[in-house]
Image (cartoon, helix red, strand yellow):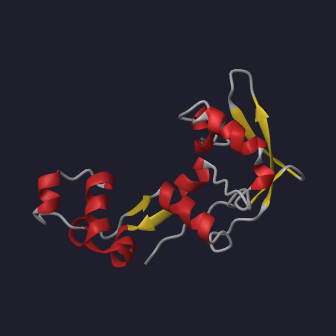
Amino acid sequence: GSCDMSANLFSNQFNIALNQQAAKIVLSRSAEFAEFTVVPSHTAQSIKYSALGLKQIGGHCIEKRILGFNCHEEPLKVVTNQVSLDQQYSDKAYSMPDLTSLLCALDPGHMGSKPGHIEVDEQEGGTFLFKRSDKGILNQVNHIQLPLQDELN
């Protein structure tokens, strides 16, 4: 999802709301949870990591994933080491929304986020919109101020 609804891939703003019934239960009982981490998709998608930095941390397994998924290299070339991040993609950086969301949840201060409150507004048709508020559900990642580019070097 996105704060800019025209950029949304789904009718709901955040991935949690893809299962609307589960989202309703969780959000209606938010006080029972220690904390929430809400990372808008436009934030998670905007942060890029250098390919070589990720390889340095994750080794050949992450290199093969990046070559296949991000670089769209043929599987046979990847497994036979005909392509590598060092040779063909050393200057590239890639968005990894799932990694960014995980890092925001584990160490929100490091990613530049600020805690805040949100309120849930259920639209006609069951769509959920999260709105910033000074009351409501406390979440640990309300919004990361952009531009922020966290590249692993």
Residue 1 picture location, percent across and down? 59, 41
- Residue at 49% x, 56% y: name it: 98
Residue 146 picture location, percent across and down? 65, 60
Q: What quarter of the picture does the C terminus occupy?
A: bottom left
Task: Residue 148: tell me if it is visible.
Answer: no
Quadrant of the rendered image containing residue 44: bottom right
Quadrant of the rendered image containing residue 85: bottom left
Residue 9 picture location, percent across and down? 53, 34
Residue 126 picture location, percent across and down? 69, 26
Instruction: In the rendered view, tell whether residue 106 sits above or below residue 101.
Output: below
- Residue at 77% x, 50% y: name it: 30
The extreme front residue here reads: 32
Task: Residue 109: tell me if it is visible.
Answer: yes
115 horizontally vs 15: left or right: right
93 horizontally vs 79: left or right: right
The one nearer the camera, 119 or 96, is: 119
The one nearer the camera, 11 or 87, is: 11
Instruction: In the rendered view, tell whether residue 63 sits above or below residue 25.
Output: below
Instruction: In the rendered view, tell whether residue 89 sits above or below residue 121.
Output: below
- Residue at 58% x, 35% y: name it: 19
